[in-house]
Amino acid sequence: MSGIVVHLPEGSGGHVVGQAHGGAVTLRLGPGERARFGRGAPDVPVEIRLADAAISRLAGEIVATADHWQLSNHSTRHSCLVENPEGAGEYLRVPPRRVGAPIPFEFSRVVLPTRRDTTVSLQVFAPDHLYMDPQHTAGPAGSHTVTAYSLDETAAYFLVLVALCEPWLRDSSPVAVPTTPQVVERLRGHPVYGGLTARAVSSHIDYLAEEKLRTGAAAPPGTDRGVRRKGKREAVVTVALRFGIVREEHLALLPGRTAEPAGRGS
């Protein structure tokens, strides 16, 4: 993956300038590109507009680099919180007026305080963290081999992928790919990720399909949302199983089963 992806989930209270309002939106930044966020104004242009009176007109700026991203906090009053949703509470606080703070997380949530009961947040998917091939041996400089699909097996997105693949690993002819609610229910007993919501699971599936496993072109415009979602789930399962990314031993990452799951749906 080159550059970063900034994602505003549906209902986040913000939108990307130039894109339609209403649903989830995504902004892609290549290395060296930047996106400003805040309430904006005619004389304060921003790429990501966040409609809350407690957020500065220019609250901050995200800059993509070759292998990570940086966050500048232009607020003079409030810190920006950068959470690692996969780090069991790990977070960074970027203080007011801090410029170019490097963010090390592969998946982050930028959280801004508001005067409402909820905060406003952006999701940022960073460049892949590359891992050497496990069978790698030292060779001439510049000749090291890295894995074609760079996945962190301790991350929440990998756990979601295992849950999607589980029926195929336990039964060679399953009825259907698990739905998002079924994945949420399957992970409910996990000690770290048992609280994943349907929205979070959907975001991880988007990340797997579009960035990690690069499953191909998006569905044609006008395709029903449910059909698109099902297509993404099926695509990531196909790639993960075809290339041995998820194997039977990975089932041990899932919480134990206390009862048979509900019937699979589409």
Image (tube, rainbow, N blue to C red):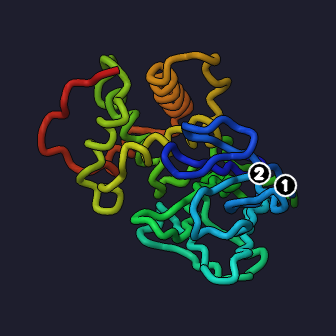
Q: Residue 3 — which label?
A: 2
Tell me: 116 left or right of 91: left
Residue at 65%, 34% in the rendered image: 214
User: Up-down: is 146 above or below 104?
Assistant: above
| Residue at numbered disc 1 | 33
Quadrant location of residue 118?
bottom left
Graded by Cα atoms within 10 Å as few (under 14), some (14 to 19) or many (20 or more), the crowding at tag 2 reads many
**Under tag 1, what secondary structure?**
loop
- Report crowding for label 1: few under 14, some 14 to 19, many 20 or more residues within 10 A (C-alpha): few
Residue 32 is situated, as x and y percent measured from the top left of the image, at 87, 57
Q: Which x, y percent locates residue 52?
A: 57, 61
Specify the amino acid type for callout 1. Glu
Q: Spatial distance from mark 2 to mark 1, Cα to Cα?
A: 8 Å
Residue that extends furthest to the left in the rendered view of this protein: 259
Q: Say which of marks 2 and 1 sits in front.
A: 1
* Residue shown at the point (78%, 62%) measured from the top left: 63
Q: Are marks 2 and 1 in contact (CB under 8 Å)?
A: yes
